[in-house]
Image: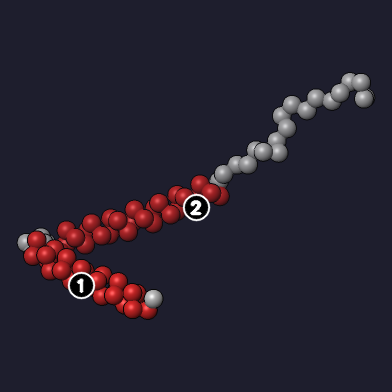
Amino acid sequence: MKISIILIALLYVNTAVLLAETIGRLLSGVSIWVLLIIEGTLVIGYYVNRVVRDVRKVAEIDLTNLNLFVVKNKKSA
């Protein structure tokens, strides 16, 4: 079990290095500022998503116990 975990980790690292080298060559002409702006936009979008989800949970109205029409039986009264 330990050896398989080590092998999986090594495969992951090897794949990451191979992909990083290829992606590095492809993105060598791209300005770093474009990537930083995209990253910042993603972080802000994630934060807004979390806030909206939390506000939606807090503002959720539970109407399961609401009895709008309570009719009493006339025979028992």
- Taking depth in this image into account, of 13 and 24 the one nearest to the observer is 13
Q: Is residue 25 above or below residue 72?
A: below
Q: Position of residue 1 (x, y in %)?
A: 39, 76
> Could you tell me the amino acid type at mark 1?
Asn
Compared across the picture, whether 20 is left or right of 61 comes to: left
Sequence-wise, the earlier of marks 1 and 2 is 1
Residue pictured at 55% horizontal, 46% vertical: 59
Residue at x 17%, y 65% (from the top left corner):
19
The residue under the point 71% across, 29% down is 68
Side of 27 relative to 58 (left or right): left
Q: Which residue is mark 1?
A: 14
Quarter of image, res 8: bottom left
Location of residue 12 in the rendering, given as x and y in whole percent from the top left corner: 26, 70
| Residue in the foreground of this view, choosing between 19 and 53 | 19
Residue located 93% across and 24% down the image: 77
Q: Residues within 10 Å of mark 1 (few under 14, many from 20)?
A: few
Name the residue tied to disc 2: 54
Which quadrant holds residue 16?
A: bottom left
Quadrant of the rendered image containing residue 9: bottom left
Q: Secondary structure at mark 1?
A: helix
Measured in 3D between alpha carbons, the distance from the residue under mark 1 to the one under mark 2, in whole angstroms, is 39 Å
Q: Is residue 49 left or right of residue 63?
A: left
User: In front: mark 1 or mark 2?
Assistant: 1
Q: Amino acid at mark 2?
A: Asp
